[in-house]
Image: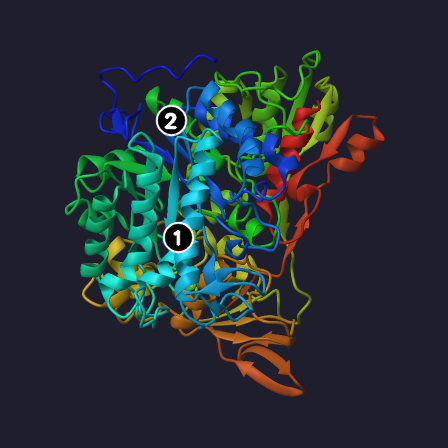
């Protein structure tokens, strides 16, 4: 048994967050639930030790209750053909590794039971009816009345096996558009038997699952139900139907109601970084007001002050966070120590977590590449962490401390410097500008990406904590580095924008994207953006955002207010119609923008799978013209001249912003290498493809681990 997380002091700034709560006879030490995440490690028994290490580390970090990724109660309910199930004693025995590891750390863990229904990616999928989902290629088979009954029993049986496996309870996945949610909604349930035809009959599938599990499991077993507080799809549940379901679930024996928001097919973003913090807490509040069992709020609650506010305002009894525990396994311990500045905050980017999941790759985290790799020797735990994993992968002899110079304080340089210093090396970090951050300093200026500032806040604290010597406004020379006697030099000098070889590209109204993002340039009312990668989309969003029309070209702004965001996406805070939807209201764009690319492929094809549609929808709503397959002819007083499919066209614009990629800055590399220095390129200095902080931070972490 390892040392438990210290209790918060009496003067904690988060008194509600650290108030114990008893659920089904189990006392939780705080109000923080680690929500369910599919890590891509659930589907092979060989990966069970990796899952055990992952969950044990979060238990040791103080999570009050942990919910696993989803496991199917039967074969047809699997998300993919070989997804994990809990349907046999053999399954239960394999999970003992997980539950024993969590309990050894003093944690509590429940298994999520998830039936995919029509969201399954295999031809055996079933549903409440035969309507196919827009996100899978298969048409479901409608469950017969007897098959529905068998499915209920499969859930009960799976819960029994979960108890055999040592879990403290189960979570029933009843939201996000999976099978139970499909039964609840008239959108997908047009049945006329005992499991459909009226709101009460549509609720029966959910309530029978809970009632029968409670009868079989007894009172000392946590049953959490993941309830869709608002469906955000046409013909979703009404507010009254949602409240009635909550009451019935309590009567059926649910111990706790967890928040789910929106179906996966909803055209409203729910967890990306542009969604305001705690945007859906008020939907949770409505449910909390009609039940006496605890209710957990979720979605875009990533820092202690936000969590504390939701609890203090009686919007929820607990806070469920998933991705924040990818970013920092010690989230709770740091909050308990009143040290929020030390939390490595989730920035809602989805790049290494959900995007990986939808690519059938193991999930990790952009800001914490060790997540999901706790047993990987390339990502050993940091010696300076107060909380270490249950079982370190190895105990190698610590290498002798080295003197390390890191050049460039962008994401790669910051990760390399702090990781190396935390491992006992003497590190000096050189930055030519007056502030840390590199491309993240630009990213945080983009509307909807304000959260990127949290990563820089974390690194500022981490630099001080690990003792890195930081030199700002210092463009270090090769001579200085060679004379400094460093054992290792890491060049994280980043990138510079690539120019374009177009006649007229040197005109005063042609700008590199950093000048526009930083506000050094104010663009006129008509703009052409060259290059439609991630940066081109970001710049187009910045230039068109209605909120900042009066401050054209200057990006010093705060996050979008919740009410404005709700109007933009058609979310009805009053929940007056089915699904909680209303007609979106698009404010006039600040400018007319043309987004142009040479490629003939779909605009934004290289954007993240789970976030790209949000950016495309935003720009389309603002009237941005997407132009593909363009040849750039010249720029002159008339504007930007293009040739598209053999036809000439002139975009009559005031300014042209170039977002045509980047070039690595590595002018120091050849000199240092020729002089025999031990020098390594990391981040953009190594590869200057479309800006990739995920790759940069992961590479820097690996390099620092083997110094």
Residue 332 circle label? 2
Residue 152 circle label? 1
Residue 11 circle label? none
Which residue corresponds to the image point at 56% horizontal and 60% vertical from the top-left? 121
Q: Position of residue 228 (x, y in %)?
A: 31, 54
Q: Position of residue 627 (x, y in %)?
A: 55, 76
- Select label 2 or label 1 by which is in front: 1
Q: Is residue 347 visible?
A: no
Using the image, determine if residue 631 lies above or below residue 685: below
Q: Quadrant of residue 621?
A: bottom left
As rendered, which of 50 and 354 lies closer to the eye?
A: 50
Which residue corresponds to the image point at 34% horizontal and 71% vertical from the top-left? 191
For the C terminus, the quadrant is top right
Using the image, determine if residue 134 lies above or below residue 224: below
Mark 1 or mark 2, which is nearer the start of the sequence?
Answer: 1
As rendered, which of 614 and 182 lies closer to the eye?
A: 182
């Amino acid at each position: 048994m390892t040392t438990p997380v210290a209790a918060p002091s009496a003067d904690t700034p988060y008194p509600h967050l650290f108030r114990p709560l008893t659920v089904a006879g189990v006392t939780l030490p705080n109000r923080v639930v680690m929500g369910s995440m599919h890590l891509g490690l659930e589907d092979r028994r060989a990966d069970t030790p990796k899952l055990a290490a992952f969950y044990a580390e979060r238990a040791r970090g103080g999570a009050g209750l942990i919910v696993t990724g989803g496991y199917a109660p039967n074969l047809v309910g699997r998300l993919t053909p070989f997804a994990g199930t809990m349907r046999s004693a053999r399954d239960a025995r394999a999970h003992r590794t997980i539950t024993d590891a969590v309990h050894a750390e003093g944690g509590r863990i429940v298994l999520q039971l998830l039936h995919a229904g029509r969201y399954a990616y295999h031809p055996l999928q079933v549903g409440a009816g035969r309507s196919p989902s827009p996100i899978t290629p298969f048409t479901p088979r409608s469950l017969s009345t007897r098959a529905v009954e068998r499915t209920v029993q499969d859930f009960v049986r799976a819960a029994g096996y979960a108890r055999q496996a040592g879990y403290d309870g189960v979570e029933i996945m009843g939201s996000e558009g999976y099978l139970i949610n499909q039964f609840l909604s008239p959108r997908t349930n047009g049945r006329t038997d005992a499991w459909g035809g009226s709101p009460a009959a549509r609720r029966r599938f959910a309530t029978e699952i809970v009632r029968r599990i409670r009868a079989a499991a007894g009172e000392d077993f946590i049953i959490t139900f993941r309830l869709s507080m608002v469906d955000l799809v046409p013909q979703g549940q009404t507010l009254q139907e949602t409240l009635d379901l909550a009451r019935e679930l309590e009567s059926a024996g649910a111990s706790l109601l967890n928040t789910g928001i929106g179906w996966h097919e909803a055209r409203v973003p729910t967890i990306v970084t542009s969604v305001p913090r705690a945007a859906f807490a008020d939907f949770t509040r409505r449910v909390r007001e009609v039940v006496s069992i605890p209710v957990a709020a979720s979605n875009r609650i990533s820092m202690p002050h936000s969590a504390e506010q939701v609890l203090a305002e009686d919007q929820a009894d607990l806070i469920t966070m998933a991705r924040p525990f990818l970013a920092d396994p010690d989230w709770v311990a740091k909050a308990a120590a009143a040290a929020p500045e030390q939390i490595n905050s989730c920035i809602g980017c989805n790049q290494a977590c959900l995007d990986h999941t939808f690519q059938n790759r193991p999930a990790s985290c952009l800001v914490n590449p060790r997540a999901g790799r706790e047993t990987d020797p390339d990502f050993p735990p940091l010696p300076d962490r107060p909380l270490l994993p249950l079982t370190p992968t190895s105990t190698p002899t610590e290498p002798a401390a080295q003197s390390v110079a890191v050049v460039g304080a962008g994401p790669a340089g910051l990760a390399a410097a702090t990781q190396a210093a935390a491992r006992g090396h003497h590190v000096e970090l050189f930055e030519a500008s007056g502030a840390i951050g590199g491309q993240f300093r630009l990213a945080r200026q983009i509307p909807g990406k304000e959260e990127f500032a949290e990563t820089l806040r974390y690194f500022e604290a981490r630099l001080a904590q690990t003792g890195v010597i930081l030199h700002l406004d210092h463009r270090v020379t090769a001579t200085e580095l060679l004379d400094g006697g460093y054992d290792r030099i890491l060049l994280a000098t980043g990138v510079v924008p690539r120019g374009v070889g177009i006649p007229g590209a040197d005109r005063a109204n042609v700008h590199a994207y950093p000048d526009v993002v930083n506000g050094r340039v104010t663009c006129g009312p008509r703009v052409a953006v060259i290059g439609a990668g991630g940066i081109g989309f970001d710049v187009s969003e910045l230039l068109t955002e209605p909120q900042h029309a009066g401050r054209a070209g200057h990006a010093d702004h705060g996050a979008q207010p919740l009410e404005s965001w709700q109007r933009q996406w058609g979310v009805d805070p009053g929940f007056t119609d089915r699904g909680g939807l209303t007609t979106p209201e698009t404010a006039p764009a600040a400018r007319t923008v043309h987004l142009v690319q040479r490629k003939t492929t779909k605009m934004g094809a290289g954007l993240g799978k789970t976030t790209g549609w949000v950016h495309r929808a935003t720009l389309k709503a603002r009237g941005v013209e997407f132009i593909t397959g363009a040849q750039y002819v010249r720029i002159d007083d008339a504007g930007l001249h293009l040739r598209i499919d053999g036809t000439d066209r002139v975009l009559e614009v005031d300014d042209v912003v170039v977002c045509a990629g980047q070039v690595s800055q590595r002018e120091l590399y050849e000199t240092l290498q020729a002089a025999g220095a031990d020098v390594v390129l990391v981040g953009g200095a190594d590869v200057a493809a479309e800006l990739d902080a995920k790759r940069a931070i992961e590479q820097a972490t690996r390099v620092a681990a083997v110094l």
